[in-house]
Amino acid sequence: MESLGRHSYSRKEKSLGVLVSNFLKLYNRDDVDLIGLDDAAGRLGVERRRIYDVVNILESIGLVARRGKNQYSWKGFGEVPRALSELKEQGMQERFGIVPCVTNSEMVLYDEAREESLKLTSDDQENSPSPRLDSKKEKSLWNLAQNFVKLFLCSGADLITLDGATKALLNESQDPLNMRTKVRRLYDIANVFSSMNLIEKTHIPQSRKPAYRWLGSEAISEDQFVAAPASLCDRNEPKKRVFGTEITNFNAKRSKTDCSSKDSKHYGNENTCNENEQQQQCDSKSAVKRLVSSPLAPAGTSKKNNTGNNHSQRLQDLENISSTHKLQYCNQELFGLLGHYTETWRSWHAEFGRK
DNA sequence: CTTTCCCGCCATACA
DNA sequence: TGTATGGCGGGAAAG
């Protein structure tokens, strides 16, 4: 019904936060080990690019680990504490505690002597291949995410603003242009972390400045369990990938890896992907919903099952129904009673067909 | 207006 | 070469 309702689009529905939430809901299970990027993208109905974002950030916490091309492995939440403590230690060793950050009050302690945090000790003598391999990683989402948590873990600060974090993590490069980009990334990361309750968004006491507070690694769970009940209710339509984005997204991910060639491809938009979801025990009261979505064509591979197709499909259906029923109800009484209805329908049908 | 941040172009890395 | 990965920043929604 709302597929026609034009402006049902909301940015929030497509945020990295909900993506991650769905991602966790999907893979946070004991029996899950390998995660295929294509599979994830397909199941979640997003472009592959977004999966990279999610996975990179999750990896910084140890939730997942790169297994190889197209493959990540699911480590559990059990791994998180370990990873965090490791990060903390790492951060302590570096200058991470002392940087422009926010105290409980609201003051922004300006920078300080963070100059020689350079790797005087571990200068070169590292990766032989590329000299600039380092710079590459420094800018990665993965690295940024780790540094972000280090900030929380190492500085005594309770609240941290993205602004402050940016300045702290930006190596002296006060360039405003650089900062813009950095903040964007931090927003991404913060959204992910807060969606899994690792951090929480608040405000600095007096000023209205938004800031983040660190929550332990314990309150992380809860929401990402199988969660059958809640997910079923709003299971109506995917509503992501409404329209407009279609044409541009040509993700020619042929891939098909090898192991499981069971792919339904990305075009998981529209009414295709949701059905048959998983095989969870969610059928408690799902039966009711099931009926509603069936009328539409099974779609399948056609990427462009536009409205035109639907109409003709609909027509076909009606036609079938009408013929069947005509044979069925040969009772004179009924026929007479419904006569004008069928007549009306017939004329409508004719007109519609003409158009 | 400013803050938040999604989208997807396209540079790199890799096979 | 083709594919996989993921910086990066435009610009639009949200506030």
Image (cartoon, coloured by chain):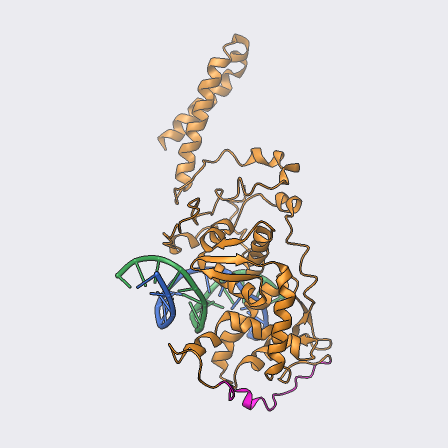
Chain colours: A orange, B blue, C green
Determine which quarter of the picture holds residue A279: top right
Residue in the foreground of this view, choosing between A53 and A313: A53
Magenta: main secondary structure equals loop
Q: Residue at x 67, y 65 (%)?
A: A217
Picture coordinates of residue B2, whole percent (x, y) = 57, 75
Q: Nearer the viewer, residue B2 or B13?
A: B13
| Image coords of residue A44 (percent x, y) | 51, 51
One can see residue A161 in this view: no
- Residues A158 and A2: in front is A158
Q: In this rendering, would B7 be left or right of A197? A: left
Residue A243: give x, y in percent of width and height. Answer: 45, 51
Residue A252 percent across, percent down from the top left: 36, 54
Residue A116 lies within the magenta run? yes
Q: Quadrant of residue A124?
A: bottom left
Q: Is residue A138 above or below residue A244?
A: below
Figure quadrant of the N terminus of chain A: top right
Image: magenta residue range = A105-122
